[in-house]
Structure formats: structure tokens, C-alpha cells
Image (cartoon, rainbow, N blue to C red):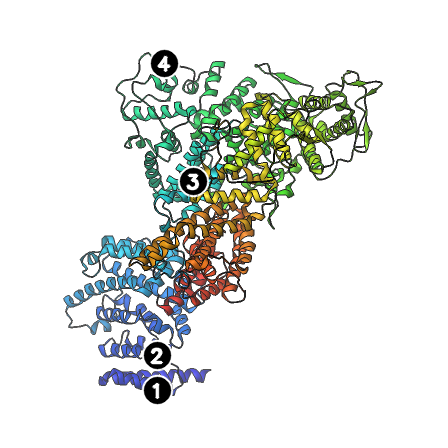
Amino acid sequence: MEVATQMSCSIWDSILRQTKVAQEKGSDPLLWSIQISSNLSSFGISLPSLELANHLVSHICWENNVPIAWKFLEKALALKIVPPFLVLGLLSERVIPYRGSCPAAFRLYLELLKRHAFSLKEYTNLPNYEKTMFSLDEVLHLSRVFGMQANEASALLVLFVFSIVWQLVDTALDDEGLLQLTENEPRWPVKPQDMEADIHDMFEGKRKEYNERLRAINTILAIELLGEFLQNKVTSRILHLARQNMCTHWESFTQRVQLLVENSSTLRNSKSIRPEVLLQLISDTQKSMRQHFQASLLQNFHPVVQSRPLVNYAGLCLGSSRSALWIPLDMLLEDAMDGSQVNATSAVEIITGLVKSLQATNAASWHEIFLGLWMAALRLVQRERDPIEGPVPRLDTRLSMLLSITTLVVADLIEEEESTALDVFEYGIGTEHRVPGKRRMDLIFSLQNLQDYQSLLTPPQSVIPSANQAAAKAMMFISGINVGSAYFECISTMDMPVNCSGSLHHLIVESCIARNLLDTSAYLWPGYVNGCINQLPRNVPTQVPGWSSFMKGASLTPLMINSLASTPASSFAETEKIFDIAIKGSNDERIAAASILCGASLIRGWGIQEHILYFITRLLSPPVPVDHSGSESHLITYAPMLNVLLVGISPVDCVQIFSIHGLVPELAGSLMTICEVFGSCVPNISCTLTTGEEISAHVVFSNAFALLLKLWRFNHPPIEYGVGDVPPVGSQLTPEYLLLVRNSYLVSSGDSLKDPNRRRLAHVASSTSSNPIFVDSFPKLKVWYRQHLACIASPLTGLVNGTPVHHTVDTLLNMMFRKINRGNQSVTTVTSGSSSSSGPGSDDGYIRPKLPAWDILEAVPFVADAALTACAHGRLSPREFCTGLKDLADYLPATLATIVSYFSAEVTRGVWKSVFMNGTDWPSPAANLSNVEEQIKKILAATGVDIPSLAAGGSSPAALPLPLAAFVSLTITYKLDKASQRFLDLAGPALESLAAGCPWPCMPIVASLWTQKAKRWSDFLVFSASRTVFLHSNDAVVQLLRSCFSAILGFNSSCCISSNGGIGALLGHGFGSHFDGGISPVAPGILYLRVYRSIRDIMFLRDEIVSLLMQTVEDIVYGGISRERSEKLKRSRNGKKYGHASLAAALTKVKLAASLGASVVFLTGGLGLVQSLVKETLPSWFMSIHRSEKEGDRGGMLPMLRGYALAYLASLSGAFIWGVDSSSSSSSAASKRRPKILGCHMEFMASALDGKISLGCDPATWHAYVSGFLSLMVQCTPTWILDLNVELLRRLSKGLRRWNEEELALALLGVGGLGTMGSAAELVVESEL
């Protein structure tokens, strides 16, 4: 080893002596180079030589800093005796720090840089390239400086080029005295250093002026060279890779460039590059790359052979069709209005995720996004213009979606941009560091633009006073009149001296002001108000009962309570004071406070609605009073207040408002606690409210239990909702899942707390109970729930004589049928399962037994079974049977839930005979059954659904299965009043589901019976009955979906409400009434959104959606461009131009159809259906053979557009369900599953590109799909690519290059992270893209 080292030193000493001799003689550099090359070869040293580079640079710097030495070095570079990259790196380390004292050397360095730094392709192919780059890393410490482990030579090349331009910027800054203005120290030595004395001697005799002039020229050259790096085709791409994958470093770099642009006098005086040009080059690197990428779509278009990636994603959707981009949003908002099921996830979270996805996939500005969001929410409200009556969410929920949820979504999106840190968070109080963001300005512009859509801004009749008051408030502000909110409590806007006509626009602005998204300068917007007020009305009362007087200390008198309950609060402070009274006040004050919170503030307090809901939720889990003692739960003390809250939030709209705010899990936790406590109490004690209403443990329990069961589809088996290998959707509808979601907010931390919505929900969860809650925490509830599931799963068993349950069954049967005597034997001698139960028929003291509610519920299935068996065997008449059930439900209203559960299970088992609804034993539907069936057929026909087997009952008598007959007979005994409504809201969906599962025409019979009961609900009942058809016929579902595709594209079809297509044709105007003597035509989209939850097997939709999309693409091609016109365009001079226009128009429609398909998949099956589509359906479709007789007519356009349509479908479906955020930072479970599912699909794609999988589809379809899907990933969802394996990305890139898709291959590798940055750089250099 020692000998080898000595020999090496001897070799280089010999080379340097030879160089010095040639230098002294002034030898020709070419001759010197030949001699050196020959000598190195004789020593067995390969060229280019890294050691020679080090020795030559050391030789020059600085003992031999003479022109001839530089010429030798330049010739060695030209002949590739030394590696150019290493020489440039060594010189930058040696020369730049001494550029002040050695300006000529720096000038020569810049010249060498200009000559050799741009020949990347040539130099990367040199021998020893990898060794050169790793040596360069040791010299410049690239890996350490940039904080990354670069294991590839090409990755080091990116760092090297980036370091060169960074050094040039720092050099220019330092030369002009600007470097000290930067925040961080230079990463490389650029500050001038003094030479030693002998170095200065070499420059003796040179004029100082010459050096100064040379230094100034050097600065100009450095800046010009910087511009050349940014403009050069190859190096600019290399720098773009740095920008994509080293964001923090790039940001620091651009800050330095901006400093140079703003302060450099040299740059301002430069004739070759202007400051604004340099700044644009830095700012538009990504934009220019994207434009270059997009240019290949329509250029030299050949539909089959040369189809390019689908890249101009937004540009093909401009003009009038632009509004159709928001169809997924309209469908999501409308879907949230379905009252048949609540959601465990906040609508704020769902809409925010969808909005982000739409912004990314449509390449839309935030101004467009906000405008589209407001317009979608406004359309949601306007669809309730002429609603049908029924137990469904109405206008209040839609207004909350517009004025509360949408505003919160916007606020969260703005906070996401503006918040840089949240050091301490407390509810309502936070330490926030914000910087002004562009999104806030885009919000302002979008709200100003809303004034151009007056038809959407017309307020519904019920909110006109609120809109007028908002307009009057703005009018007074611009008139300089400061009256405060108390003034409007004393005067109506009708009394104002000028027209204060308001609109929904005024309410939206007020909602934004309430959440600090806007300030009162919005009142000054042009056209916002109609004029000024010169004087106020006279004789206005100085003070009336209202929020202002309450805040000033007025007591809660009955008049004040009524006023506060009927007028929404306008500030957080007002509601907080009410909340404090509810916690600390007397019993009467608590009741009053609860009534106020559940009044107008809950429904119409849009600016603070989430606070109202939080306070109500906290009151349902009130704190333990300080003076509480004894073993009894402290909740018993709060019983009157709790009951007021439970009744107040039980209406359908209120439940739905809790749902869209994401409080269902928290509400469920509170209700379970209440049910556990009050269901275990013996109802010995009751209290009478001031209203005269009597409150007992049974009443509180029943109200809480009925509300709890509304939070999941309790009468459906969870397995019914299973999808693929994903946990069943039904798991989201169980107590366990609701508590799991609730508990997840307690453990939220890190990135999840950056989400404002999750912070709000986490605060509510921790304020009610800081500990997790599980079903095991409620033993009584758990017993009932297990029994409930067992009842659904199998026939009823387990009643044992002599047990407490058996005794309770006897007691309840005696109570229900105590007045019925037949001979010597009581009619209560009935059989329940394998045991019998009998009791005396006298009217004794057990008529109203004092039993805990849980004990009663445990016995109810056996009671119902015994009674149903007796009725089936003639021991009970139908009337007596239903009367007894009604007595049981009146005794404990909560028993209705268990009765529902039992009857639902028995109907599905199909063991009970049908009974004739003849009007004698059972109620008869004959009066209007034929009319109901005819109306159903009209509804279906209007939406393009034709079911030949759907025939009227004719002369055959109407019949229902015995349990269903009993159930519907029981429900129609209820009065349609407020007290009964909350229990009918529980039984109604179960009755509909139960009837829908029975053979036709069970559902029309049930609808007919209820139509006779509630004539004002007839349209709703008929519409609900029409949905049954889709439960029994998958073909009907397919027909309905086909109508949806036709409607949105405006194709001629009898089902279309509008022939113009778009959102109006798809969703129409809601449910109109009184049209041709009945319900008006319903848009197909509305019908589907109300139908799909009834489809038991949704998996068939995967193939059907793909099939319908392919058929729609064919309709687009052959319906949009006639054969004659196509031939004419081909022969015309401008045929190519028109061909491009036709393609663009077709792609717009294709995207529209795919967007609808993705929305249907997303809403119908969620994660499971999307996963199955991507993982199974699409690969299977591509491997199958597809042929169309018409394909030849288009020369290949049809198969290409099919590929693009499937690319849109897959990309949009994934974006909607997976989101576009990083899977590592997202709190969404769907995002966590994305890497696995996407990886499987990309593996299939790569294997097919590698030829390992045989495809049956048209090659043009496959080409279009792959290029389209990958293009959309690159541009719209780049975070997805970071989830993929590096080797997989390289395989995809190689496959694309075999198709000559170098642009897309580069883009794919470019966004793949640091792991693929080297491969991307290789492609840039090799292809010189």
C-alpha cells in the first residue's frame, strides 16, 4: 500500500513538472494535452482523470494563476482529459471567494462555466461519470448542504446545477452589498477573502480601475449566466426538478433572487436581461413546464397512433359548460338533504375534501371554486321553492348548509392558507399567527360576482324578514347611522323610510362577517344596497324584550323567554350567557335556557349555529353539581332540562343540522348516557312543568332513546351494506362506530389538529368527557343491542318460565289486553316461542306497572311475538291486536323501536301468512290504491324508466304479510301532532324499508293507507313508494342512471326535464307539487339520490357505470358530429382546426359524463365501490374484448375517447374518495388506504406496459387511458405519486418512453419525490427535453 502511494505521488509529481516546464516554455496547449494524455495512458490511468483535475486546479490556485495555465486547463477540458463537472466544482470552491482580488480568474471561471455547464448530455456519457459526481459531492458537500442522501449520480447532477445558480445569485448579491440582507448565511463561500502577500505581488502594476471595471463586468456576466441557466431548455428542466422536490431550498433560493431583482443596480442597467424577466423565469418555472407539457395534446393530432396525454384538463371545459364542473358538489349537497340517514362525518369535512379535489382536478382558481360553491349551495336552497310536504328535512337544513356549513368550509380553507402556527388552542380563544392570503381576496371577488346571479339570490318567503334586516343594517352603516342590534328588535323593516329589500346575498355576507371572513367594508360594494337613509322612523319604542335587553341584565320573564326563543341570537356572547344560566341557574331557569337554545337560534342562528349546537351537546352531558350527593346519577336532577332539549332537537331538520355539523357521534355518546341512567330508573317520581306537562323517567328515556335510534338504521342488518373487502358501510351505522368516531377526536394530535373542523369537534368531545366512551360503558344498552341484533338474525328464543323477563312479559300482556275476556280463559293466554304466558283478565293494579324501561324493552319482543301469534291463530282480532300494541307504545313510547325491530325481522323471514286489507279486519287501501299506482308509473315514466312487470293490482284484493299489516295499522293510529311526530320519524323510515322489501304491490298499499291518513303528505308518500321499484329491479336502476347521463348531456330523451343538459336537467327544481293533478316530473338525478340507499347489492353498479359511460361516449361521438360534416371538414382547408375544436368539444362532454359517473360511484358506494372499481372492474374491462360496429366510422376517435373517459372516471372517483392531500398528513381513513389500492392499479398498468399482461381492448383505448390517467395524476394529484414505489414509477416511465411519451414520462418521474429525481434528470439530459 505504501509503495503504491509513493508511485502515485511520483506519477503526479512527474505530470506537474511536465506542466511547469511546458508553462515556462510557453508550449502549445494542444501539444501539452497530447503529451499528458499519452503519459497518463502509459501509467494505466483512465480518462477523464479525477486526480488530474484536482492537481491542475490546485496548480493554478494560486501559485500559477497565469494565462498559459488556464489555457492548459481549458484544453484538458475540451479534450475530456479531466471531468468538466469536477473542474467546475473545484474552481467554484477556489475562485469565487477570491473573485475580488482575482477578478480575471473569476472571469475565466465564468467563461468555462458558460462553455461547459450546458453540455450535460455529452458529459454524463463520459467514463467515470458516477465516480466524478460522488467526488463532486465530497468537494461541494452537496448532500449535507441540501440535507438529503443522494445515492445516484443523476440526483447529484440536479444538486450540482442548483448549487451553481445559487452561487451565482449569492455572488451577485455580495458584489452589490446585498448579501447581509438575507436571512441565512451563504451555503457556499462567496464572501471575498484576502490573498496572501505573494499572491498580491502577481497583480502589482495593474491598475486599480481595471480591476474595478472587471469586477463590475463579472457581476453582469454572473447575472446573465444565471438567466441563461434559467432559460436553457435542459438546465431549466433540471432546476424545475429541484423546485418540485426541494421546496424549502427553492423557496430560500427564490427569496434571494427577489432580493436581487428589487435592489440590484447592475441588473437594472443590464441590456441583456431585465429584472422582471429574471423574476418571471423564477416564478414561472412550473408554469412554463406545464405549458410546454400541455402543448402536445392537439399538436399534430392523429386520433389513434399519436394520441397525446389528456393534459389541458381545465382548458377544455371553458365557456358555458364550466358550471357543469360542479355537478359532484351539487349532488353531494342534495344527497345530504336525505333525511333517511344521518352521517357520522361532518359535512364541513366532506365538502372541504370535495372542494379541494375539484379545485385540483379542474385546475380552477380559488375564485372559481368559491363562486361555484356558493352557487351550488344557492341552487340547493332554490330547489326547495315548492316542496312536497312530508317527514323529511326542509328549508331550514338547506339554509344551514348555505349560510353555516358553506361559510365554515370557506373559513377553514382560508385559515388553512393563512395560519402558519397554532401554538395554543382553546375554544374561541387561540394564539394564531396569520399572514394575508390570496384565498381571502378570491372570496371577496366571488361574493361580488354573486350579484350577477339574481335568480339564485331571491330569498324564500320565510327568510325575507332576515334578508331585509341584513340589507337595512348595511344601509344604515353607509348612511353613517349607528343604531346597534337593539334597534331592529324595536322596529320592522316595513317601517323604514326607504326600500330595504334584501336577498340571500345579504345573508351570505352577514354570515361571512360573523366569522371574520369579511368586514363591514363589504357594505360599500357597488350595488350592495339601494340607497341611503336620511332619517329614522319616529315613535320607536326605546326597549322591548329581546337579546339586547337580556344582555343588559333583564330577567327571564315568560315574555322575554318567548322573545329569545323566537329570535335568533346574533353573537357568541349572547348564547354563552344562556348556556351559563342552563348550567348554574334554577330548575325553571334551566328549562327556559334550554327552550331558548332549541328555538330560533338553533334553526336560524346561522352565524353562530355551530356554537349553539356545541352548547346543546354539552348540556346533554351536564357537569355534576357541587352540592350533589348520594348514589343516584346527577342527571336525574337535570331531567326537566334534558327533556326540553331532547324534544327541542328531535325534529327532522334539527337532527339533520346536527348531522351536517358532524355532531352525531358526540350526540350519540350523550344520549347513551341519558338512556342508561333513565332506563334503569323505576318511574315512581314525576314532576310537572309550568306548561302542565308531566315528566317521568319513562318520558325522558323514550325521547332520548327515539332520538338515539335515529342516528343509525337500527332495523337493518349491518351485513347488508358490505362492499368488497372493505369493512361494511353498515359499520358506520352502529353504536360502536359512532363512539369510535367520537373517541378519535380525543386523541387527535399533530397534523390532524391543523384541520380547523377537527379542532372544533375535538374541543366538543373533550368538553363533555375527556375519556373515551365504549358500548361496554352502558351495560343495559349493550344487553338491548345484542338482543336487537339477535332478533334480526334469527327467530325469537330464550324466554324461560319463572324468570324476571317472563314475569314482565305476563305483566305487559295483561296491561295490553286487560279488557278482553272470552269465557273463562283470558285472551292473554298466548304462546310466545316455546313458552306460554297467561294472566288474569281483571283490571288490577298491574295496569300501569312501575318497571324500568330497559326491563320493559327486554320483554317487548316476546310480547310482540305472543300477540302476533295469537292474532294469527284468531285468539286476537286485528283491532284488538293493534289496540294492545298502541297501549304498549303509549305506556312506554320507546317500545315502538323494539316493535319495529321485531316486525322487520319477522317480515324478512317470510313465515307469516298474508292478510287481506279488506276494510273489515284490516284497513283497506281500495279508495286510492289505483291512483297511487298510476302516479308511481307516471313518476317512473317521466324519468325514463319503463318496467313492464309493474302492473296495477286490478280486481285482486290487496294483501300484506301479517307483521307488515300490523305495523302499518299501528302507525296510522298515531296522531300527526308534535308529540307523536318524533316517534313517527323513527317508525316511518322503518315502515318504508320494510314495505319496500316485500313483493309488489305492498309498498303502494302502505302508501295508499297513509295517504288516507295524511292527505297533505300524498306526494311524498307516492314518491317514496315509487322508489320501491328500484329495490326489486336492477334493470330499473340502470335505466334511471341512463336517464341521468342523457339529462346531463342534453341528449334528446323523454326523461329530460330540460333539453339544455347540465345541472338543471340532472337535478331539476326539487319536488314540485300540484302539476297535472299530482306530483310534477322529478329530475332523474333527484330520484337516484333518493333511491340508491335502498339498493341492497350495489356492486353491480361497477360494471354498469363503466358500460353506461362507454355507451355515452359513443353517443357523444356519433350524436355530436355527423358523418357528412366530418367528411366535409376533412376535405376543407381548415379541417385540422375544426377537427381540434370537435375533439375539444367531445372531451368536454366526455369529462362531464365521467364526472357524473364518478359522483355516482362516490356517493353510492364510497370507499368500497371506488376501490373495487379501480382494483377489479377496470383491469377486467381492459383485458376483455370490446367491439363496436361504428368504430370504423370515426377513424379511431371513439376508442381514444373511451380511454380518456375511463381515465377521468378513475381519477375523479379516486380524488373524491381519497382526496388530494398527502396520505401521511391526512386524517381520512380513505386516504390511508390509497397507497395500497393505487399501487395495485399502477402495478397492473406497468405489467401491461411491460407486456406481461395481455389486453383485449383497442390499443388506442389503452394508450389514451394510460396517458390520460397518468397525466391527470401528474397535474392534479401529484401527492398520489409520492405514495408509489420508486421502481414502479421507473417501469411506468420506461413504458411511456416506448410510446414516445417522453414529456409524460419526465413529468411522472419529476413529481415522484427525491427517489425518482435522478431518473427524471437522466431523462431530461438524455432526451434534451
Residue 348 % position (x, y): 47, 38
The foreground one among 1120 and 745 is 1120
**116 left or right of 1252 in image:** left
> Are there few (<14), some (14-19), or many (20+) residues within 10 Å of tag 3?
many
Which residue matches tag 4?
542
Nearer the viewer's eye, disc 4 or disc 2? 4
Instruction: Say what amino acid the circle numbered 2 marks.
Output: Leu
Residue 341 % position (x, y): 56, 35
The foreground one among 238 and 1135 is 1135
Q: CA distance from mark 3 to mark 1?
A: 80 Å
Instruction: Say what amino acid the circle numbered 3 marks.
Output: Ile
Q: CA distance from mark 2 to mark 3?
A: 72 Å
Label 3 sits on a secondary structure element that is: helix
Q: CA distance from mark 4 to mark 3?
A: 50 Å
> Are there few (<14), some (14-19), or many (20+) residues within 10 Å of tag 4?
few
Pick whichever of labels 3 and 1 is earlier in the sequence: 1
Q: Which mark is residue 52?
A: 2
Contact, CB < 8 Å: mark 4 with mark 3? no
**22 left or right of 319 in image:** left
Nearer the viewer's eye, disc 4 or disc 3? 3
Nearer the viewer's eye, disc 2 or disc 3? 3
Label 4 sits on a secondary structure element that is: loop
**1217 left or right of 897 in image:** left
Instruction: Say what amino acid the circle numbered 4 marks.
Output: Thr
Which residue matches tag 1?
39
> Are there few (<14), some (14-19), or many (20+) residues within 10 Å of tag 1?
some
Q: Which mark is residue 1063?
A: 3
Label 2 sits on a secondary structure element that is: helix
